[in-house]
Image (tube, helix red, strand yellow):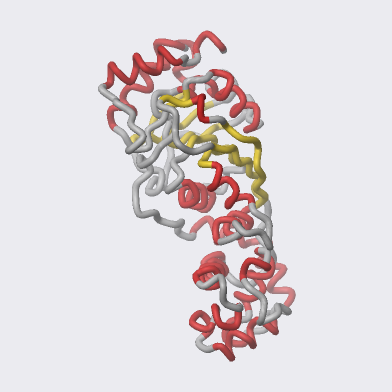
Amino acid sequence: MGDILLGPSDVRALAGALGVRPTKTLGQNFVIDGNTVRRIVRAAEVGADDVVLEVGPGLGSLTLALLPVVRRVVAVEIDPALAAALPVTVAARAPGLADRLEVVRGDALRVTDLPGPPPTALVANLPYNVAVPVVLRLLTDFPSLRRVLVMVQAEVADRMTAAPGGRVYGVPSVKLAWFGTARRAGPVGRAVFWPVPNVDSGLVAFTRGDPPPTTATRAEVFAVVDAAFAQRRKTLRAALAGWAGSPAAAERALRAADVDPSARGEALDVTAFARIAQYRLGGAPDGSKADDHAEGAQGADDRAAGGRAGRDASGGRVR
C-alpha cells in the first residue's frame, strides 16, 4: 500500500501537469503525507465489504489509501480536470485496483443518485464552509451510509461534536445528533498539507443511529433548532415566538414538552428539540403514534431535502 500512495513530490508533479496552482487565498491544500491518509482509513473503520463515498478526492491522496482496503470507492469531484485525472492516476499507480473506482463529476450538495451498490461509509476531506451541509445532505439522501469519517477545520470539528451546554454547541451539533453520534477522532497538523494552511484540522467520526422518538418530521424539528439558535442569547420563550406564533404559544409548547421556557437553546439536546416540535400549536401526540413514528422516521428523513450552502463543494477544499 505504501508504494502506491502519493508523496510530496508526486503531489506537486501531478498538480503541475494539470496546471493546478494551489493558493491559500483559494483554500486549496493537498495532503502530501502517507501516514495521514493511512490514519484516516484506520479511523474510518472501513473494510472489504464497504462501498465508500469520497467527496472531493482532488489528486487522489486519500483515494489511493482507500482502494486496497474497501470493496469500492465512489468519488464525487466537482472540478472537471481533477475528475478526469483521478482514474488515470489510479490506473498508473494501482492498476490492479482501478476497477474499484468510480468517479462522478458533480457537486456533492446536489448529487442525488450514485452508480452501483449503495454507499456504506462517507470518508472525505471537506472544505470548512460546506462541511456541515454536505454531511447532513448525504446522511439525509443516502440512508445506507452507516459511518462517516471526515477531515475538517478544527473549529468545525468542535462544533460538529459539541455537547449541550458548551460554548460551541449549536445548530451543527444538534442536527448531526438527529442522525447519530459524532465524536472527535483526533487532530491533524498543518505540515501534512501543501501548501501549509493557516488553520489546524481535525477528524470527526460518526455512527448512524435512530432519531429521537417524536411525531414531528425531521424538517419540523430542524425548524425549531434553527429558530432557537438564530437568537441564542434569548430565552426559548422569546427565541421561539416567531416559530410558535407568539411568546405565549412558545411557552405553552415548551411547558407541554417539559422544557423550561427561560432556558436557552444551548442547554437542550436533540431529544428535547424533538419534543418541542411535536407540541407546536398545542398538539399533544398520542404515545403509540410517537413510538410508531420513531420506527419509521428514518424513511421519512431520507426523503427530506438536505441543506444548501452559499458556495459549491469546490471552495476551500483540503485534499
- The residue sitting at 57% across, 24% down in the picture is 36
- The residue sitting at 68% across, 51% down in the picture is 209
Q: In which quarter of the image is the N terminus?
A: top right
Q: Position of residue 306 (x, y in %)?
A: 46, 56
* Tally of marks: 0
- The residue sitting at 40% across, 18% down in the picture is 11
- Residue positioned most to the left: 19
Q: In this view, does 318 lie above or below 48?
A: below
- For the residue pair 23 and 59, the one nearer the viewer reads as 23
- Answer with the quarter of the image where residue 197 lies: top left
- For the residue pair 109 and 284, the one nearer the viewer reads as 109
- For the residue pair 165 and 59, the one nearer the viewer reads as 165
Q: Position of residue 220 (x, y in %)?
A: 54, 71
Q: Is residue 278 above or below residue 281?
A: above
Q: In this view, does 188 lie to the left or right of 6?
A: right
Q: In which quarter of the image is the C terminus?
A: top left
Q: Is residue 171 above or below residue 40?
A: below
- Residue positioned most to the top: 3
Q: Where is residue 68 in the image (x, y as percent from the top left)?
A: 56, 18
- Residue positioned most to the front: 198
Q: Where is residue 244 in the image (x, y as percent from the top left)?
A: 53, 83
- The residue sitting at 70% across, 80% down in the picture is 260
- Answer with the quarter of the image where residue 173 lies: bottom right
